[in-house]
Image: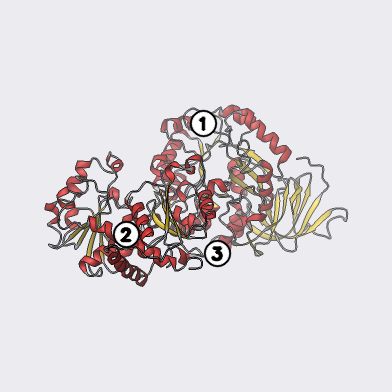
Amino acid sequence: MVSAASSSSASRHLLGIQGLSRPQIEHLLDQAEQAVELSRQVEKKRNVLRGRTLINLFFEASTRTQASFELAGKRLGADVMNMAVANSSVKKGETLIDTAATLNAMRPDMIVVRHYSSGAVDLLARKVDCSVINAGDGQHEHPTQALLDALTIRRRKGRIEGLTIAICGDVAHSRVARSNMILLTKMGARVRMVAPSTLLPTGIGDMGVEVHRSMETGIKNADIVMMLRVQRERMDGAFLPSTREFFRFFGLDGERLKLAKPDALVMHPGPINRGVEIDSEVADGPRSLINEQVEMGVAVRMAVLESLSQHLRNG
Amino acid sequence: MANSQPPLALINASLIDPQALSQSSGGVLIEEGLIKALGPSVNQASLGSDIQMIDCAGDCVSPGLIDMRVFIGEPGAEHRETIASASAAAAAGGVTTLISTPDTSPPVDDPAVVDFLLRRARDNAKVRVLPAAALTKGLRGEELAEIGLLQEAGAIAFTDGAHSIRSSKVMRRLLTYARDFDALVMHFPQDHDLASPGGMNAGALATRLGLPGISPEAESIILDRDLRLVAATGARYHAALISSSQSLDSIARAKQAGLPITCAVSVNHLCLNENDIGDYRTFFKLSPPLRHEEERLKLVEALADGLIDVIVSDHNPQDVETKRLPFDEAADGAIGLETMLSAALRLVASGHISLPRLLARMTLRPAEILGLPQGRLAIGAPADLIRFDPDEPYVVDPSKLHSRSKNTPFDEAHLQGRVKLSIVAGRIVHD
C-alpha cells in the first residue's frame, strides 16, 4: 500500500487516499467484504494480528473512530492500547516528535493517529519504525472514512463508477470531504461539492468535481447525498449567519431529498447535528445509511490493518 | 573597524559595477579601508612589490551585499542566532552590511538597546551590523516609538519587523511623525485578521493539503492603505517584503505617481514557490507565504525591470523546537544570509536578469535607500568587496553553514557562486 507521502517507507503506512491507486482501493474493499461477513458471525475473532500491538493515539477526541479501530484490532487478535493524548504528556509540553519517539521505543506494530493539525500524521510516520494509519489529520485526510463510505455505497448500489454523489455542507473544513472527493473521483463517480461559498475551499473547482452553491441544483438526481457535519462554532456569524439560516438553505429534510433520485441514499460520517445539517426524519428514515456506515467502518479498518500487517517486521 | 591595515589589491578580476551596470576586467586597490584605485590600470605591473596582492584569476569582484532584513535574536533569542554567528554567516555569504530587525526581546524600542547592539556589533561582528529600531513601543502597533532619540542613538531605519501595524490611525501618525526626521519607515504589509490562521498561499495546493491559506489580498490591502497614507504624508516608505503581483501593481501605480516609496522581495520568493512545501516541509513555511509559480515569475520580471528595488535574505533562524512540528504549529522563516547570493544567481543563470543588475538590487539600491556610502564600486567608496565565481557549483550542506540555526530551504540544493572572499572596510573577513 502506498502512502500519501513520498516518504521512503511508503508501503508501511496509510496516510491518505491520495497515494492509493484504484486497484489498491478495490482490493481493500474486497477484503473488507470478508470482514463484514466475519463480523456478523458469533465467532468474530481471527489470528492474523496475534502478538501484535496496536496503539490508538488520539490527539483529538473521538468516540466512534477510536472504538472502531479498537474493535477492528481486537477482532484480528491484536493487543490494543488506547492513548487519549488530551490528558497526557503533550499537555506538559512534549512535542509530537518526542511522543512519537517514546511510543516507538515501546515497539508497537501499528499506531493509529488522529491529530488536529494537517500533516501531523505524516510527520509522525517519518519518526517511527512501525506502520502508521491516519485516523484523521486536521483538514487534510481521513482515509478510512472514505474507504468505509465507498464500501457502504458499493454494497448498496453494486458499483461506484458512474454514480452521482453530492457531498454537502462544510467542505472547507472537512477532511472527510477531501478524502471522499479523492477516492470517489478515482473510482469514476461524478462528485458534486455543495456548500455556501464561505465553506468552499479555494481551487476546489479544479479538482475534478462539480461545485454547487445551492442544494436544489446540488442534489438534483443524485444517487447518494452525503451530508457533512457542520461545527457549531462555524455558525456563530464567522462563516454562516446562524444555524437556522444554514438549515433553511443547506439542511437536508424529506422535502428536499425528493429532488434526488427516487432511490437515492443518505449518508453522514457522524456524529450528526439533528436539525442543523440533517432532519431527524431523514437521518432515521429508511434511506439513511448512517448506522450501516458505522458497521462498514469496523470492516474497512480490519481490512486496512490486515493489509498493512503484511508489511510488518517479521510479518 | 580600525583602518590601520596595509594596502591590499585585488587583481585580475572581473569588476562588477552596479552603478554603471557594467562588467569589465581590472583590479581594485584598497587603502585606509577605502577604494583607492580601480580599473585595468590596477595590475601586477603597476603596483609596487610591497603591496599585498590577491590574484582573482578572473573571478567576479563586486561591492559586498547589503541585506536590509535580517533577524538576529540578540538580545533574547541567542540560541537561534547571535550577532557573532549571524555576522559569520553574512561574511561567508558575501553580505558585508546587514540591517537587523528590532523584534528581539527586549525589542529595539529604546535608545539603550540600539546602543547595546552597536557595542556588541563593534566587539563581535565581522561585518557591518546596522540596527533598525521599532516603529511602535513594544512592537504593539499602538504608540509611537521614540523615533528621534532612536535615530540619534544610531538606528538606521524603522520597522516593526514581522509585525504589521493594524491601526490606520497609528500608521498615519507614524508616517507623519517620521517625515519630520526624514526617517525611513520599513513596513511589512499584512492584514493580520485576513491572514490568520493561514500558513501557506491560499489556493488549490493549500486545499489539497488541508491547510488554511493566506490570500494575496492580505498583503495588498495593507500595502494600498500604506501607499495612500504615504501620498497624504510624504514620508519615506519601504515595503519590507512583498510577494504577489497585486502588490506589484500597487507599487507600480505609486511609483508612477512619484511617491517616495521602494520595495523589497526576499530571495526565497524569487527562487521558490508553494510547491516546494511538498509534504508539509516546514522549512518552506514563510511569511509572507511562498506563492504560485506564475506569481514568482512576475516577481522576477519586476526585479529585472526595476519595479522591485531590493532583494533581501529575510534571514530568520529557527531552531528544531520551532520547526520540527506539524505545519500549522511550526514557526515561519528561513535562514538566508549565507545562500542569498548563490540562490539569486539562479536568476542570472536562467537568463532573467544580468549579473550587474542583479547585484545592484543587493548593493547600490539598498545603499541609496538607506543613505549609505558603501554598495558602490567607486574610488573613495568604502572597500566592502566580495569575490566569487558565478559558475562554480556547490551543494549546500546545512551542517557547514555558520548560522546557529539550520533551517535553510536550500538544504542539499545545487547552487553556483560560493563567495571566496569578503572584505569589509579593507579587511578580509572571510576567505
| Residue ID at (28%, 42%) | A232
Q: Are marks 2 and 1 on the same chain?
A: no
Classify residue B43 by image quadrant: bottom right
| Residue ID at (80%, 51%) | B8
**Amino acid beneath label 3:** Gly
Eye-nearest disc, 2 or 1: 2
- How many neighbours does mark 2 have within 10 angstroms: few (below 14), some (14-19), or many (20 or more)? many
Give B150 or A210, whichever is nearer the viewer.
A210
- Left or right placement of residue A287 versus residue B100 in this view: left
Which secondary structure, mark 1? loop
Give B114 or B195, whichever is nearer the viewer.
B195
Residue B322 at x, y percent in the picture: 54, 46
Using the image, tell me which numbered label, if any, was put on residue B136. Answer: 1
| Residue ID at (20%, 67%) | A157
Which secondary structure, mark 3? loop
**Amino acid beneath label 2:** Val
| Residue ID at (58%, 53%) | B408
Q: Chain of mark 2?
A: A
Which secondary structure, mark 2? helix
